[in-house]
Amino acid sequence: MAKFKKKKSAPTPGSDDSKPKIADEIDVPEVEKSEPLTNNSKDPSKDPPISDAAKSEKDKKLAKLFWMRIVLGVIAGIATTFIFEGIEGEERRWASIGFMIILFFGSIIVAKAMKMQLPSSDRKKIVTQGIGSYVFLYLFSWIVSYTLTHLGDVSTGINL
């Protein structure tokens, strides 16, 4: 650890003189005592403390929401292959993406009906919980199911 020389001059009078100082005998400069750091971002009056039982119930409901979106993404991706079979080209892609977004908004409504007691700082978890997994599993299952369904249609593909 680096050692610093003590100041030899007298302290200048100022507003900092009222703070108590801690002197170290190992030839290290004086350090001012400061007030303990507090997290002012959370106002205790706004967010009441959550008990362990309520926190456990909240975590269970968030986990249930996450897995619900995972299953919904896989099932909806597979269903999209068959629902939009009659639509051709670019319209099929946009219809599928619109369908994915509508189903996600439906899952938000279901999540709000679950009546999760979330603090105001965690309100966005209803929307963000499992969104990435939902989107990627939806797209993955849609692509795989479409590929497997239309595998024999392509003349250069592998016939099963």
Image (cartoon, rainbow, N blue to C red):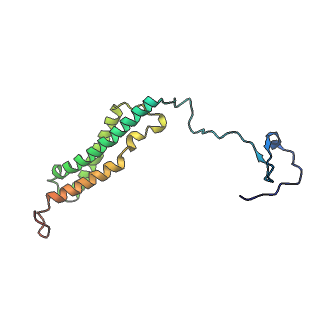
Q: On the rendered image, what quadrant is the C terminus found in?
A: bottom left
| Residue under the image location 81 percent in, 39 percent down | 18
* Horizontal side of residue 18 vs 141, given as left or right: right
Q: Residue at x 41, y 33 (%)?
A: 56
Residue situated in front as seen by the camera: 14 or 106 = 14
Residue 104 appears in the figure: no
Could you say where residue 147 lies in the image, as x and y percent from the top left? 18, 59
Quadrant in the rendering for residue 153: bottom left
Image quarter of residue 53: top left
On screen, residue 42 above or below 91? above
Q: Quadrant of residue 37?
A: top right
- Image quarter (top left, top right, bottom left or bottom right) of the N terminus: bottom right
Residue 102, horizontal then vertical, whole percent? 28, 44
* Residue drawn where x is 83% and y is 42% of the image: 17
Position above or below: 147 against 95: below
Q: Is residue 17 left or right of residue 37?
A: right
Task: Give the total of numbered labels.
Answer: 0
Q: Relative to residue 71, is residue 46 drawn left or right?
A: right
| Residue 18 showing in the rendered view | yes
Residue 83: x %, y % from top left = 17, 49
- Nearer to us in this view, 84 or 145: 145
Q: Residue furthest bottom?
A: 156
